[in-house]
Image (spheres, rainbow, N blue to C red):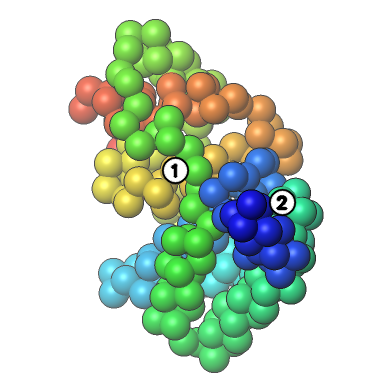
Amino acid sequence: MWCRCLLACLLLIGLAPAHAVGEHGRRFAAEIAVMRGDVEQLRAADTRPLHRRGLRARLESSLSLLGMLARQQAQERGVAPARLLARVATLRDAYRQDNLERLRDNLRTLMRDYPLSLPEWDDPAITPARLAAGRKLYETLCLACHHHPYQDRENPAYNLFRQARNEPREIFAARLYGGVRGVPATSLDNPLSIEEMTALLVWLLEAPEDQIGDAD
């Protein structure tokens, strides 16, 4: 009985467990993970000035969107958004102060509390069917921009095979989850099922070297 009372209290103050999430929760979790990856790139010494401008523009766009995503995921979970919105405000403050280390650390804590829950991607099974499906999806949706990436722009496409194999899994998974939105081929919706995205991830991780295209 006391467990039910505790859960009710947590719901009222906005501290219910964050792992039971739906689409809005996953979108919020993906956004903060992508932001953390972008901050890491921005802090890297070898990031080109042109790409730094693009990363800053993308972070500013994400920070402007994050409040809406926080409200949507809180509504989806049936909790009050105030505490999460306060945490979003600390991200904006850190960015305005150009304190990238603080921004990174706050994003890391948010990722811990609001993980992108996709257990299928922790250790996806590699099957011939998944490899074939992933290859077809890559060639249909990704190849034109990502196979021979053009780097002389603020927001370049990157080689997805190299990203999948070199970037932390939780960050690349977030990029994959959110990356098929907002492009001409897919519009603003995510047209892929979890299984289709899993197949794409398997292909990016397991494709032979002669299939992975040019370096960034």
Residue at which label 2 appears: 77
Left or right for 64, reference 163: right
Q: Amino acid at mark 1?
A: Ala
Circle 2: residue type: Arg
Residue 69 in view: no
Q: Nearer the viewer, residue 54 or 9?
A: 9
Indicate the position of residue 161 as horizontal and vertical percent values. 33, 36
Q: Is residue 62 above or below residue 86?
A: above
Q: Secondary structure at mark 1?
A: helix
Residue at the outermost top position: 129
Q: Residue at x 40, y 49 (%)?
A: 170
- Dot 2: few (<14), some (14–19), or many (≥20) neighbours within 10 Å? many
Q: State how many labels appear.
A: 2
Name the spot of residue 107 as percent of width and height, x first: 48, 69
Describe residue 125's horizontal placement relative to residue 84 as left or right.
Answer: left
Indicate the position of residue 44 as horizontal and vertical percent values.
32, 71
Q: Residue at x 75, y 65 (%)?
A: 12
The percent position of residue 106, horizontal first and vertical second, equals 48, 75
* Residue 113 visible in the shown view: yes
Residue extending farthest to the bottom is 97
Closest to the observer, 201 or 144: 201
Residue receiving disc 1: 173
Residue at the spot 54% in from the left edge and 91% down from the top edge: 97
Q: Residues within 10 Å of mark 1 (few under 14, many from 20)?
A: many
Foreground mark, 1 or 2, reads 2
